[in-house]
């Protein structure tokens, strides 16, 4: 992950998170989904519950299009929800929706609108960007902000995020940004370029998240 460089060398997102975590109280409300996610012992980490893995293909998550490949032409300033699709042990396609926290959101903005602290190297042509869609406050799925096109609003406690600026928190109680997921093109498909750049919900610390990455890598080796 160190190969991803911030646009602003003065303030890395990781420093931002570390500073924020140092001064932010632990979230008081933890959803049942979150509890289940963090409580999963490693030996139960089946492939359908693994977080997005490098090489996974992004497929639509909305019920009406679930499993269809996400195409660039599907994307706009309104979020598109997606699942990561990997491979089962027999090599067949497997959508990693065994963990509902794996749902993603993808945006496409006109060139020049995505700026720091977004990690630009983890976007596609500085136009397409992906994040965890799970609110860092208490685990709700974040939606479009209908009153501010291009922003996001959480329906649970009105948390607001700006996906053009690294999904930083611009309103409400979320303690940290939505985690950015590196993506890239593989032919016509959008694929995962690397693990989340910072710990996504329901992980509570960077150490916990790094342990999960290590477990995933070792199971897929
Ligand atoms: S879950 Fe509380 S603001 Fe999103």
Image (tube, rainbow, N blue to C red):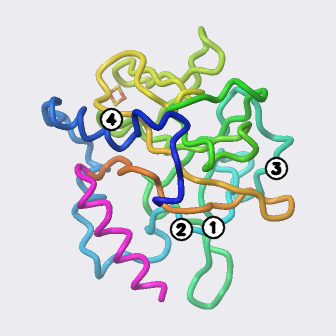
Label 1: which secondary element: loop
Residue sitting at x 39%, y 21%: 159
**Disc 2 C-beta below 8 A from ligand 1:** no
Please name the residue that numbered disc 3 is placed on: 71
Please name the residue that numbered disc 4 is placed on: 16
- Callouts 2 and 1 close, C-beta under 8 Å: yes
Asked if residue 191 is among those painted magenta in the image, a careful observer would answer no
How much space separates mark 3 and mark 2, taking CA atoms?
Answer: 19 Å
Tag 4 or tag 2, which sits nearer the N-term? 4
What stretch of residues is rendered in magenta? 204-221
How much space separates mark 2 and mark 1, taking CA atoms?
Answer: 6 Å
Residue sitting at x 86%, y 41%: 73
Relative placement, left or right, of 169 versus 206 is right
Please name the residue that numbered disc 1 is placed on: 56
Q: How many marks?
A: 4
- Callouts 3 and 2 close, C-beta under 8 Å: no
Relative placement, left or right, of 125 versus 90 is right
Which mark identifies residue 53? 2
Residue 96, image x, y percentages = 53, 65
Which circle, 2 or 4, is nearer the viewer? 4
Label 3: which secondary element: loop
């Amino acid at each position: 992950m160190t190969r991803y460089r911030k646009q602003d060398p003065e303030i890395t997102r990781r420093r931002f998170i570390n500073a924020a975590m140092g001064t932010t109280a632990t979230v008081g409300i933890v959803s049942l989904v979150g509890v289940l996610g963090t409580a999963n012992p490693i030996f139960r980490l089946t492939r359908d519950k693994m977080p997005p893995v490098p090489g996974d293909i992004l497929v639509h998550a909305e019920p009406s299009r679930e499993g269809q490949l996400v195409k660039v032409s599907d994307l706009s300033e309104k979020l598109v929800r997606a699942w990561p699709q990997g491979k089962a042990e027999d090599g067949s396609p497997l959508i990693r929706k065994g963990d509902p926290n794996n749902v993603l959101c993808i945006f496409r903005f006109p060139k020049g609108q995505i700026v720091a602290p977004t990690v630009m190297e983890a976007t596609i042509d500085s136009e397409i960007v992906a994040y965890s869609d799970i609110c860092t406050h208490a685990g709700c799925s974040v939606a479009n902000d209908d009153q501010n096109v291009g922003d996001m609003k959480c329906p649970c406690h009105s948390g607001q995020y700006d996906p053009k600026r690294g999904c930083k928190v611009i309103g409400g109680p979320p303690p940290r940004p939505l985690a950015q997921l590196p993506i890239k093109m593989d032919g016509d498909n959008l694929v995962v370029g690397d693990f989340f750049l910072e710990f996504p919900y329901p992980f509570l610390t960077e150490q916990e998240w790094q342990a999960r990455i290590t477990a995933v890598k070792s199971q897929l080796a």
